[in-house]
Amino acid sequence: MLELHKSSDEAPKQSNTAASTPYLWIDESASPSLASRAISSQQTEVYTDYVLTTFPCYFRCTANRVPVTWFDFVHNRRGSMNTCFDWALRASTTAYTGTLHNDPRYTYAARVFYVRALRSLATMLSNASTAASDDVLATIISLTCFEIQNCTNPDSWLQHVAGIKTLIRLRGAQAHLHGFGRAMYLTLRGLMVTAALLSGEECLLQEPEWQTLNRQIAAENARCPDSLAYTDVAERAFSEISKVPGFVKRVRELLVRPPRDRSAAQPALLRAVLATRATLRGIHTEFAVAVSTAQTRQNKTQGFIGPVPYHFFDGFFNLYVRGIRSALLILNNLILAMDHSQRVAIEEENRTLSGRIPDNQLNPKTEACDSSPLTPSKPSGKPDLVVRSLVIPTRSCEPSTSDWLDRLLATMGMEGVRVTLVD
């Protein structure tokens, strides 16, 4: 496969005995249509394997909620060769192949394709007619996932997400209601929540136009013949979780304000956090009921729930609930930072919530490596919120053949960060 990407002047030297024999290299210069068909066919097949390995639960449980899936988008581009998305696609599939076969040559080639994708992306961004296109957004999302898995630089994925934020603001929320835009939106939004928490910013998706988009997506899903009740609940859960980064930012700012200013501002903020926690608690219960209802309607001996196999559906449900519980843990810490009188009740609830979250999230093995909090705790004895990234270079010990990104997206970004309260 790699040989097909070589240009004619990179063809191997011929021996003296064969020097007089005409030699045609099957590439873009000798047979562009043949090379294009061969590479496109290979890329489509490998990309399918890559997505189903990397995002097994998330992709299968959201594919019927979008008009155009990532598979559709890639398949419809067969024959396309040198756009920024094509290079990003090759980078992802080549890195996946290298990990699968433990072949460093593919890993090196993947990074070459990654650089080409960046250069091509810069060209498209400089053109007003293409800067806000689906190709550009799909490229940045793909490069973000590539960085999270392969880590050419520890903070590069955050820079890509910053680019996503700028681009989707330029495109507007309604560009992501129909077509491939919706599939991209469902993929990028968990990444944006994680990035907002780590950057100490509010999440763009908490703004009214994006909250409206979530409601519109839920309404359209409800009109589908194979719609399930849990999809509406899932959309409402994300709408609430998108508010969490903003609450973390505001509470951290509150904690360093002078006592008089803090006393004036705290009641309204505390009420807002309590309201979101109450909503998420209700959604947590409602989501479990919706899933249980959907499951009981099916004959389990068939092994399917609608178009989604049970093991994928159950995996998606477990991850989504884990994301809700992680968000509740963060909100509880925010409440405790503002109101110490609730310590006993909150610590009891946190123990219950933590008991339902696997140890590998609460105490991830990557923290034993070179992981430091983005906001170190203060020695002053005052309460402080410490935000720790779980998307770190040592995650490279979880290769692109793992489901790490699946967990990150299906938990609505909560798997990528931990927020703790230090007294």
Image (cartoon, helix red, strand yellow):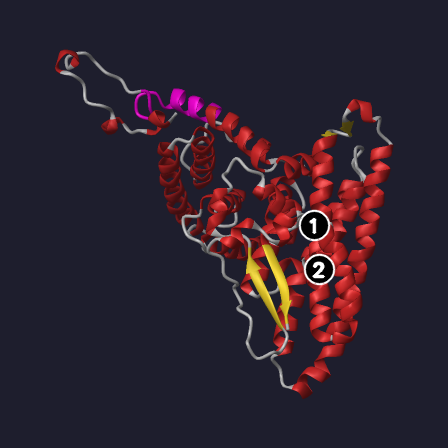
What x and y, as percent, mark residue 325? 73, 54
First reached walking from the N terminus: tag 1 or tag 2: 2
Question: If the image is split into quadrants, where does the C terminus sit?
Answer: bottom right
- Looking at the image, residue 82 lies above or below residue 158: above
Question: Residue tagged by mark 1?
Answer: 357
Residue drawn 64% across and 72% down? 250
Question: If the image is split into quadrants, where does the N terminus sit?
Answer: top left
Q: Is residue 223 left or right of residue 260?
A: right
What x and y, as percent, mark residue 235? 74, 49
Question: Residue tagged by mark 2?
Answer: 329
Q: Is residue 379 left or right of residue 80?
A: right
Quadrant in the rendering for residue 180: top right
Residue drawn 74% across and 55% down? 353
What x and y, as percent, mark residue 411? 66, 48
Residue drawn 80% across and 59% down? 279
Kind of residue at disc 2: Leu
Can you name the residue that lies furthest to the bottom here?
Answer: 260
What x and y, as percent, mark residue 76? 55, 30
Numbered tag placed on residue 23 in the rendering: none
| Secondary structure of the residue carrying numbered label 1 | loop
Magenta segment includes 381: no
